[in-house]
Amino acid sequence: MKKMLVFDMDGTIANLYGVKNWLNDLRNEKVDPYVNAEPLYNMEEMANVLNSVKKNGWKVVVTTWLAKDATKDYDKAVAKAKKEWLIKHNFPVDEIHCLKYGRTKANATRKKAEFQILIDDNKKVRDGWTLGTTVNAEHDIMKFLKSLA
Ligand SMILES: [Mg+2]
């Protein structure tokens, strides 16, 4: 059976909301908060755990929203910043999906695996997930990830 772990980014692995003036910067179409967001976990430990999880047959995916009410150019810049953030922090991702703000996350991977776990800090997004189960990333997710390793 194909299994997929689908990670959100902002507020789940990247501390965007901990960046000073993040909302104001986003409204002014600056990418700095996405670039400068600190990881919410020790990313070396995260990579080790996820590499073990992958050996157990899981694909690691990131499905993330772009900024609210953004122009096309800003969406492009944010998508680039997010991809670079994942590389910079050694996140062992197999697939990245950057969606317009508010889009249904399940549509990005609907036919790609029979069972998909969404890890997301947004309750509304978790409630709309139809492809498997969800993990509330408002709490520490490391223990859960280790249980799959
Ligand atoms: Mg989030």
Image: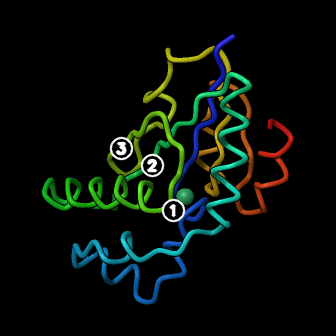
Q: Amino acid type of disc 3?
A: Leu
Distance from disc 1 to disc 2, alpha carbons, whole Å, reads: 8 Å
In the displayed structure image, the side of residue 141 where residue 33 appears, left or right: left
Residue displayed at 66% across by 22% down: 3
How packed mark 3 is, by other alpha carbons closer than 10 Å (few <14, some 14-19, many 20 or more), is some
Using the image, determine if residue 112 lies above or below residue 65. Answer: above
Query: Disc 1 vs disc 2: Cβ atoms closer than 8 Å?
Result: yes
Q: Residue 121 got which mark?
A: none
Nearer to me, 40 or 25:
40
Q: Position of residue 57 (x, y in %)?
A: 68, 22
Query: Disc 3 vs disc 2: Cβ atoms closer than 8 Å?
Result: yes
Residue displayed at 61% across by 59% down: 12
Q: Disc 2 beta carbon < 8 A from ligand 1?
A: yes
Using the image, determine if residue 82 lies above or below residue 34. Answer: above
Query: Looking at the rendering, in which quadrant would you find the N terminus?
Result: top right
Of all residues shown, which one is farthest toward the top? 1
The residue carrying mark 2 is 64
The residue carrying mark 3 is 99
Nearer to me, 94 or 140:
94
The residue carrying mark 1 is 10
Q: Amino acid type of disc 1?
A: Asp
